[in-house]
Amino acid sequence: MFIYNDPKLKSRRKELRHGETNEEKLLWASLRRKKLGFKFTRQYSVGPFILDFYCVEKRIAIELDGFQHLENKDYDKKRDDYLSFNDIKVFRFWNREVSANMDKVLKRITKELETFPRPNVGGGQVGV
């Protein structure tokens, strides 16, 4: 069993929100307030991992990667496998993609929101 938005990670989630990158700010401006038709939350934790952006309804995580992810491939694979095992689909974008071509990033996210079926699993506070 894992916990959504584990209270133990609250201070870390808050720290990440206050230290967000310019690319995270840009993408958040396009995701917040259901601008794409679905509610997203930023810095949402699932089990031991904190996701950049998460849509509970569609169980879709969006991760923005900077240069540090070139050195953390094993960690990212472990994290993606964990999320996939728990029926969460992860989409990764490089920071430079957001900066250089936001329209393309938003089109891909919108397409996935429209085509990715709503899972038959829960998306509440506690899951299996």
Image (cartoon, rainbow, N blue to C red):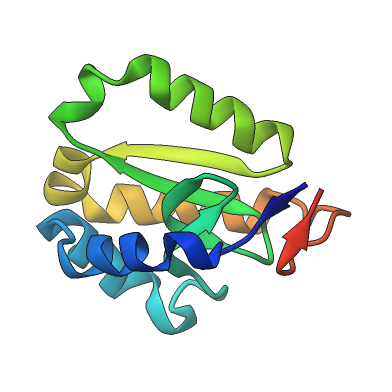
Q: Determine whether 76 is above or below 8 in the image.
A: above
| Apparent side of residue 31 relative to residue 100 in the rendered image (left or right) | right
Q: Is residue 58 left or right of residue 67?
A: right
Give the number of callouts. Answer: 0
Residue lying farthest front?
A: 8
Residue shown at the point (17%, 28%) measured from the top left = 68
At horizontal 71% and vertical 68% (from top left) the residue drawn is: 125
Residue 77 visible to an observer of this rendering = yes
Q: Is residue 16 above or below residue 32?
A: above
- In this rendering, the answer to whether 66 lies above or below 103 is above
Between residue 102 and residue 58, name the one nearer to us: 58
Q: Is residue 44 left or right of residue 58?
A: left
What residue occupies the far right of the structure in this picture?
A: 120
Percent x, y for residue 118? 78, 57
Residue visible at 55% across and 64% down in the picture: 5
Q: Residue lying farthest bottom?
A: 33
Residue 111, percent across and down?
55, 51
Q: Is residue 123 visible?
A: no
Tell me the residue at 72%/32% (across/down).
85
